[in-house]
Image (cartoon, rainbow, N blue to C red):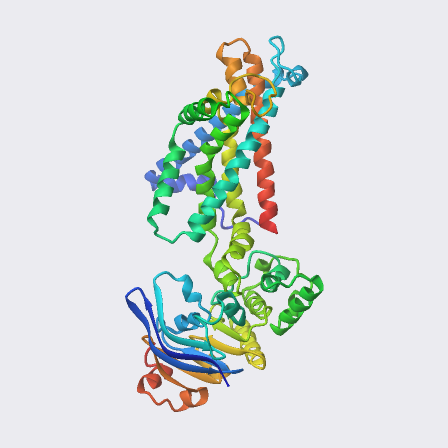
């Protein structure tokens, strides 16, 4: 039997006749959605078409040489860089958010100040972070161009992001959970760590995913701090991440094919990281 | 025997005086009902008995509240007070974790670690809250999957699990359907064998049905406090009479 609550396309068109403004709006929103969608499809499609034929096993050799622009060192550097930056920034970001939401008095002036500072920090162009990292970590602390200088710079860059998203996630945890916990005679520490933080994990992870996106995509801040050498260094050595590597390959126009191939790998990494984090978030939310 | 004694209690939210010179004695192992129109201070007084008002910024309390003759604001450590004076909230608020972990949260907070002992506490609490039969096969499932009435009984079980002496109930049935409501009322009557229960309610029939004593609040004052039967059959104060006969409120 035919459903009576559905509207056929023709009857929809008819209804627009009596209401032309609604028709215009309908066309407008459809158009906007299509443009957004097609842009993404075109971009990803273009990179895939250009990049996939150029992915060869040679690109995954351990050593980068001028004959073989291997992306393997950069791939590993990307992972290392992401791990160190997150290791530094995530605990600090989460703990500062816990202070702001759970411990600081509401309406406290210092809290307002910290919030404005964090917001301003997240709006600063990354090259400014790069310059700071260069002057402070590379020059003043004499770390030189190194993975560590890069990671610290990136950590500073993503710190406000993680703090703000964690703050919002904590605020979204209903007060009735806190009341319930206090009402059972639990102290602040236990309430925050056993009840509130676990409930906020999906939101916190969303912030971490955004942060990973920024780390993986960052070039300007790293060129100044971690350098551009395509090798697998120790922490105090210079090494390029995939994005920086891409910049290097394409800036002189000599390795465009390898550059496209690198872009495909970068795309895959981002997709993989996002789905893993999404999976973890779901898993935690279920428990 | 008097379990809780409240003397000359005033309570301010910033400049607003929410409770005015409250004097009440709450006897052991009885059900005390607080009734009155919205905003009359009955929930506020309830929350002063386990110091939940401490969490409210700008709240200032003067006067004396004692539990077993000990000042709850000076002589009893706050977490210990809240263990002894448990609370069930207006809206069921199970934690977003399994039924088992919800009940175990309180005992674990107070240092119970042994699995066998926890299992015992959990079964006993759930039985006492008359919900064991409904959840015994799904203890590891999330508590958020339960119905509203089940969640509220779970919260009662959670409060019982820390072996409190007093149970504060802040309109525990206002968010529930009639069947769940009657289950909770039966439960309250059952529980008063072992616990002192103080219940805020908007429902005068509920107060009349289950409580031993009733206090009528109006604009932050206790207008009348008496045996429930007497208060409802022959109220001494005109305002009480007007309220229980439904002339206002």
Residue sitting at the far left: B15
Labels in figure, total: 0
Q: Is residue A138 above or below residue B80?
A: above
Q: Position of residue B98 (x, y in %)?
A: 62, 58
Judge left or right: residue A189 versus residue A65: left
Q: Nearer the viewer, residue A29 or A147?
A: A147
> What residue do we see at 60% from left, 32% from top?
A272
> What residue do we see at 60% from left, 9% from top?
A66
The part of the image, by quadrant, that contains residue B179 is bottom right
Q: Position of residue A69 (x, y in %)?
A: 60, 13
Residue A104 shows up from this direction: yes
Q: Position of residue B40 (x, y in %)?
A: 35, 73
Residue A23 shows up from this direction: no
Q: Position of residue B190 (x, y in %)?
A: 58, 80
> What residue do we see at 51% from left, 77% from top?
B197
The part of the image, by quadrant, that contains residue B33 is bottom left
Q: Is residue B48 above or below residue B138?
A: below
Q: Quick one: quadrant of the C terminus of chain B? A: bottom left
Q: Nearer the viewer, residue B9 or B45?
A: B9
Residue sitting at the far right: B116
> What residue do we see at 50% from left, 21% from top?
A144
Q: Is residue A224 above or below residue B115?
A: above
Judge left or right: residue A69 versus residue A138: right
């Amino acid at each position: 039997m035919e459903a009576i609550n559905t509207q056929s396309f023709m009857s929809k068109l008819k209804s627009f006749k009596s209401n032309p403004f609604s028709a215009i709006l309908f066309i407008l929103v459809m158009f906007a959605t299509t443009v957004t969608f097609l842009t993404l499809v075109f971009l990803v499609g273009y990179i895939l078409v250009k990049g996939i034929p150029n992915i060869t096993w040679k690109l995954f050799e351990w050593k980068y040489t001028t004959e073989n622009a291997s992306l393997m060192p950069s791939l590993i550097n990307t992972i290392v860089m992401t791990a160190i930056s997150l290791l530094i920034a995530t605990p600090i970001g989460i703990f500062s958010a816990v202070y702001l939401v759970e411990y600081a008095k509401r309406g406290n002036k210092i809290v307002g100040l910290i919030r404005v500072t964090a917001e301003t920090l997240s709006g600063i162009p990354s090259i400014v972070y790069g310059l700071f990292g260069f002057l402070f970590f590379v020059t003043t602390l004499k770390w030189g161009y190194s993975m560590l200088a890069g990671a610290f710079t990136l950590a500073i860059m993503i710190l406000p992001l993680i703090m703000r998203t964690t703050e919002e996630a904590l605020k979204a945890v209903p007060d009735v959970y806190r009341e319930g916990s206090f009402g059972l005679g639990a102290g602040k520490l236990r309430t925050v760590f056993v009840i509130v933080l676990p409930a906020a994990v999906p939101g916190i992870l969303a912030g971490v995913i955004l942060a990973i996106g920024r780390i993986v995509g960052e070039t300007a801040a790293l060129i100044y701090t971690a350098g551009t050498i395509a090798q697998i260094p120790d922490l105090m050595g210079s090494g390029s991440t995939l994005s920086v590597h891409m910049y290097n390959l394409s800036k002189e126009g000599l390795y465009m094919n390898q550059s496209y191939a690198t872009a495909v790998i970068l795309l895959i990494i981002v997709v993989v990281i996002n789905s893993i984090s999404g999976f973890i978030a779901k898993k935690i939310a279920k428990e | 025997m008097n379990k809780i004694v409240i003397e000359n209690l005033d309570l301010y939210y910033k400049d607003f005086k929410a409770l005015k010179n409250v004097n009440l004695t709450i006897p052991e192992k009885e059900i005390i009902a607080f009734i009155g129109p919205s905003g009359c201070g009955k929930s506020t007084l309830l929350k002063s008995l386990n110091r939940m008002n401490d969490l409210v910024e700008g709240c200032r309390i003067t006067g004396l509240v004692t539990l077993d003759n000990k000042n709850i604001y000076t002589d009893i450590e706050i977490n210990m007070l809240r263990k002894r004076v448990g609370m069930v909230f207006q809206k069921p608020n199970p934690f977003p974790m399994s039924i088992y972990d919800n009940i175990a949260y309180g005992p674990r907070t107070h240092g119970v670690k042994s699995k066998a002992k926890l299992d015992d506490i959990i079964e006993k609490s759930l039985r006492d809250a008359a919900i064991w039969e409904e959840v015994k096969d799904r203890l590891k499932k999330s508590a958020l999957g339960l119905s509203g009435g089940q969640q509220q009984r779970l919260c009662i079980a959670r409060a019982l699990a820390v072996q409190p002496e007093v149970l504060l109930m802040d309109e525990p049935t206002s968010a529930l359907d009639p069947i769940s409501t009657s289950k909770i009322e039966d439960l309250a009557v059952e529980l008063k064998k072992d616990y002192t229960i103080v219940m805020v309610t908007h429902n005068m029939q509920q107060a009349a049905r289950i409580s031993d004593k009733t206090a009528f609040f109006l604009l932050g004052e206790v207008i009348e406090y008496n045996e429930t039967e007497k208060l409802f059959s022959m109220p001494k104060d005109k305002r009480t009479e007007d309220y229980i006969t439904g002339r206002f409120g």
